[in-house]
Amino acid sequence: MPERLSPRERAAAFALFALCVALYAARVGEAYAQPALSSDFSYFLPRLLDGRWWRQVNGAFAVPWFTPAFCGGIPRAVDGQDLTWSIPEALTRFVDPLRAMELTGVIAPVVAAAGFARLLSRSFGASGWTSLLGATVVLFNGAHLARTLSGHLAYHGMMFVPWVCLGVTAPLPDEAAARRRRLVADTLLAGVALAYIAWSGLLNLLLPMLLAIFAVALLRGVMRGGYRDIALRVISSGVLALLLGLAKFTAFIAFFSQFRRDAYPLPGIPGLGGTILAGLRAVFSFPLTFEGASLANSRWVLEPHEWSYAVGPLPALGMLFALGVALRARRRPRWSRADRLALLCVTTILAVPLVVNVYTPGFNALLKRLPVVSSSSNVVRWWLAYVFVAPLGVLGFEALPPRTRRMVALAGVALCAVAFSRLDLARFARGGYPTAPVRRAWEISHRGLPPPPITAVSAFAARTLLRNTALLRGESQRYCYEPSFGYALERFPRRTLHPGPITDVTDGALNLKNPACYLWPAANRCAPGDHFRASQREAMLRFASRRPFAFEMSAAQRVANGVTLLAWGAALVAAGALAADALRRRRR
């Protein structure tokens, strides 16, 4: 059993963590208060507004398969970075998109920190003070912080990884009925959290999240046993997450099979030694202090936020302390065959994000032939796998006597807070994108006025940050900011899309794309990128006013939709049954 804190110690620990959260929220709020922010806010702010407008017209539960607001009409709910079913989109019902992003930027790390503290105490048997230190390390992690400041809203989903890990690794009770209840509850927790990661915009980086989950699960088995229980929940929660997300996965594959992004060169760090050194510096420095390593074969210079995966030096110190204690004891650990196999798997998992970043011409050519990797513009982002594995290093401080452990935890929390308070966060958020127009449009919508329908296509300069704000004037931007078609729209099928009214007819085609052709061209008798035909004018006008229009889905998509609806229904019923059973047992 983990060492329990006294009521006074629990109150002190909670107050200390609350102060850290208040500091975090205040500093992030200062960075967001600037009138112009970094370029990627120009992608997510208009999309959040567009989602708000869709719900205003159609209600909270209508599925926005498509949006007319960008690129002359594109898929929406199936995009890997789509936020339709997410915390920030839900928040836009009450606050403007910028405030929704700011609140999400604070809520997500608090959720992660709470989950990690619970993971340390329940799954790894850590004491309360060590759990507090681990939660603080995760709260201030640089991966989410850097992306919050840079406007990369989709990364908030990664902060649910600790809850997935908790669901698959928490110990199960011995009594049969309690064991079954706990197994169902853990499967629901892990499966729903994993499905949220996929649905909330981080589908493109789901693989590094899975690597982190597998590594944590195997380390839990090595340290405390229970491989069979862990494997059972990994499988059951994985199946549940697959069923809960099957509709999105199916449509996502249909979309991106039409527009693969494998034309970009894949950058890497020259030499294995240089890659390992860069990885260690990126993970164990203080957040936002590592500016990056030299890259080979890169078309673009990676900005500082792309190199931030830092959890600080405290986990590394914990690992070194535990190693020193083990060497001083001069006792070889008693590992079973299963433990040795698990350690081999953990080593392999943790090596993958490093190895794929090593650059040699021959190895790079091999990577470009692999699925997923070949479509990446860089795989430094795979270092996200370390963000929730490296903080487990604080478990090394469990070897300290209780009083010393408490002092180390308090000193560590103070060190994290002081280091964070000295960071220049504003420089990461600062940019040239003005946020006021989108916020004013939300305020108008919040007063109940209807959103402007799309009536025309516009054509701003391809690089302006204001491209996607054309929707504020009822226009769909031809040169939109949409990475699904490549960073420079290399794969965008422009066809006859041109500046002018959407009712213009060119060779029998209207001036707005039929977005269903991107996903299910055979079922809709068209090709990806085709426009609405002149005979489909009524359907186009419904689409332009953000209302559902008639289109066909593939048989596979219809089946996937049905499976996902049944899975969510079953998950809600199971959760309700567990809650009712818990209430009934409490009343006895």
Image (spheres, rainbow, N blue to C red):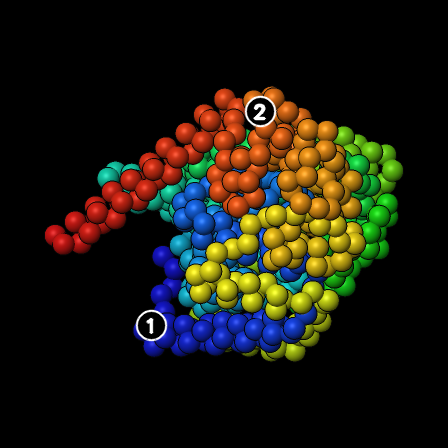
x and y percentages locating residue 525 in the rendered image: 61, 22
Image position, residue 582 (x, y; %): 22, 49
The picture places residue 201, in percent across and down from the top left corner, at 56, 48
Q: Label 1 crowding class (10 Å Cα cut-off): few <14, some 14-19, many 20+? A: few
In space, the residues marked 2 and 1 are separated at their CA atoms by 65 Å
Q: Which residue is painted at 55% across and 40% down in the image?
A: 541
Please determine whether, in this image, residue 434 is positioned above or below residue 168. Answer: below
As drawn, is 377 to the left or to the right of 197? right
10 Å crowding of disc 2: few (<14), some (14-19), many (20+): some
| Total count of labels | 2
Q: Which quadrant of the view contains residue 426?
A: bottom right
The secondary structure type at the circle numbered 2 is: loop
Is 229 or 388 nearer to us in this picture?
A: 388
Q: Label 1 belongs to which residue?
A: 6
Question: Is residue 287 toward the left or the right of residue 445 in the image?
Answer: right
Residue occupying image coordinates x 46% and y 41%: 63
Point out residue 302 in the picture as x, y percentages from the top left corner: 78, 55
Q: Is residue 521 in sight in this rendering?
A: yes
Q: From the viewer's perspective, is the residue at label 2 or at label 1 nearer?
A: 2
On screen, residue 202 versus residue 480, left or right, reads: left
Name the residue carrying label 2. 524
Q: Earlier in the sequence, mark 2 or mark 1?
A: 1
* Residue 415 in view here: no
> In the rendered structure, which amino acid carries the disc numbered 1?
Ser
Label 1, secondary structure: give it: loop
In the image, what residue occupies the spot 52% across and 29% down? 551
Q: Amino acid at mark 2?
A: Asn
Q: Which quadrant is the N terminus positioned in?
A: bottom left
Q: Nearer the viewer, residue 178 or 330?
A: 178
Quarter of the view holding residue 512: top right
Query: Who's the residue at 44% across and 37% down the image?
Result: 244
Residue 538 to residue 92: above or below = above
